[in-house]
Amino acid sequence: MDTIKFVSVNSFLEDYLVVDILINGYRLIDLLQVVESRYARAEGRVSLAGAYEGLPPLMVLPPNKHYWGEANKEYVTPDGRVVLLEYAYSGVPGDWTFAANIEVNGEFVSWSDLGNVQRPNWDYSEIGPFKFDIRQYRDALEEAKERSY
């Protein structure tokens, strides 16, 4: 079983908050950088690897149901996945999107079909899918909400 934590942090670009996601104690962005570095290097675009930042807490933390799979349309990909991270350097939704299917099933929340919308052939199977205990997931969201507002 995987564990998750949502933490509001200052963007490294400007003075605004974003939600950083930690899975099993590791920043999701760091995990992605490791996986993506070989693909980005092969394209000659090394700077793309892990070039993400989280989404605004007001848009994705409770009372919003974003991380329960009920995202605002701006944060849903054309194939129906929920956006987890966006490109760190543009601020344009959909510019460099990392997304997943989020499914709530009984006692679990699962993130599957992980991928970068702009690079559908990049394979993320070495880090996911993820399966979380619903109680731990709910508590992590509530804790993030309390610390963000």
Image (tube, grey):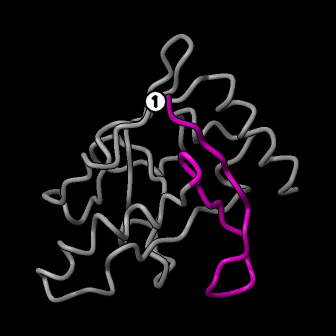
Q: Element type at marker 1?
A: strand
- Location of residue 16 in the rendering, given as x and y in whole percent from the top left corner: 73, 77
Q: Position of residue 15 (x, y in %)?
A: 75, 84
* Residue appearing at x 27%, y 49% in the figure: 126
Query: From this viewpoint, which residue is outermost toward the top?
Result: 106
* Residue 80 drawn above or below residue 50: above
Check the image and report above or below for 123 versus 86: above
Q: Is residue 20 magenta?
A: yes
- The residue depicted at 41 percent of the width and 61 percent of the height is 31
Instruction: Using the image as rendered, state which of residue 73 and residue 55 is in the foreground.
Output: 55
Q: Residue at x 48, y 15 (%)?
A: 105
Q: Residue 106 colored magenta?
A: no
Q: Position of residue 139 (x, y in %)?
A: 75, 32
Against 109, is 60 above or below? below
Tell which of 56 and 78 is nearer to you.
56
Residue at the image point whose x is 53% and y is 70% from the top = 53
* Residue 69 pos. (x, y %): 50, 34
Magenta range = 1-25
For mark 1, what is the residue? 131
Q: Is residue 109 left or right of residue 79?
A: right
Amino acid type, residue under disc 1 in the picture: Lys
